[in-house]
Amino acid sequence: MKDLRNKNILITGASSGIGEKVAIKAAEKGANLILVARSEEKLKRIRDGIQEKTSAQCIYYVLDVSDLDQVQLIFKKIIKEVGSIDILLNNAGFGIFDSIEEASLDDMKQMFSVNVLGLIACTKAVLPTMLEKNGGHIINIASQAGKLATPKSSGYSATKHAVLGFTNSIRLELKDTGIYVSAVNPGPIETNFFTTADKSGTYVKNVKRYMLSSDRVASQIISLMENPRRELNIPRWMNVGSILYLLFPSVADKLLGNILNKK
């Protein structure tokens, strides 16, 4: 079990939702927090709250991870100022639920820019120092949607499939190093994610009973930081559908088609 005290943990998308909850819980464990997001106002509020309630060091940097040039500049600044990153939590991401005929290509392009290319850029930015010290942990927030696609989420599911493909590939590349690589695949979570993703409110209404609390997900991500493993699937029962789809795709399409049409 890894002790998080004095570990440098960098969290993207840290201004709300899972990123914010993980930051607070990691601070309570004595970690040093580096928070990254677009909203300086929200980052400052979280930083001030952490410093008021804990003795943890917490700094923030304003960054839109879809700006790849800025990712390189800001991460170089971070590493120069704080040293190497022990744990990178690639949490920044968003989704928009639309049928393919109604989906905007601009929206899809932006989802890939943030969810995939931004995640890859952040990973590449921390990797050299992790390799140099032969240690570290890269945690990528994917989704059950990356394993089991559903109607009206083609663009979002495609980005999360890409995140899982990237995560699994670099895990193999880094298998002979001291760097852990993990994917987190949650189901729907009670956060402001759906303010953008589900403007009609239909999906939230249909799956409300299955939605995970952000506190529960954050606690399990902290446990993953302390006990690294390949994947974290939340909730476990939801992953059964993903396994069924992997083993018997045609059967799963017939059995799960109507069940998964919640948007």
Image (cartoon, rainbow, N blue to C red):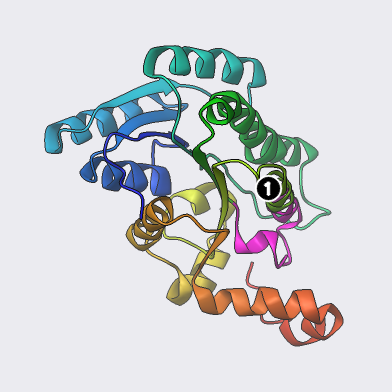
On-image quarter of the N terminus? bottom left
Q: Quadrant of residue 78?
A: top left
In screen coordinates, is 242 left or right of 43?
right
x 44%, y 28%: residue:
36
Residue 155: within the magenta? Answer: yes
x 72%, y 82%: residue:
256
Q: Position of residue 47 (x, y in %)?
A: 26, 29
x 79%, y 79%: residue:
247
Residue assigned mark 1: 163
In screen coordinates, is 219 left or right of 92?
left
- In the foreground, 102 or 246: 246
> Given the image, on which type of amino acid does mark 1 rest?
Val
Q: Position of residue 91 (x, y in %)?
A: 51, 43
Q: Position of residue 85 (x, y in %)?
A: 45, 29
The magenta span reads: 142-162
Q: Position of residue 223 (x, y in %)?
A: 37, 57
Residue 261 makes an appearance in the image: no
- Describe the element under mark 1 as helix, strand or loop: helix
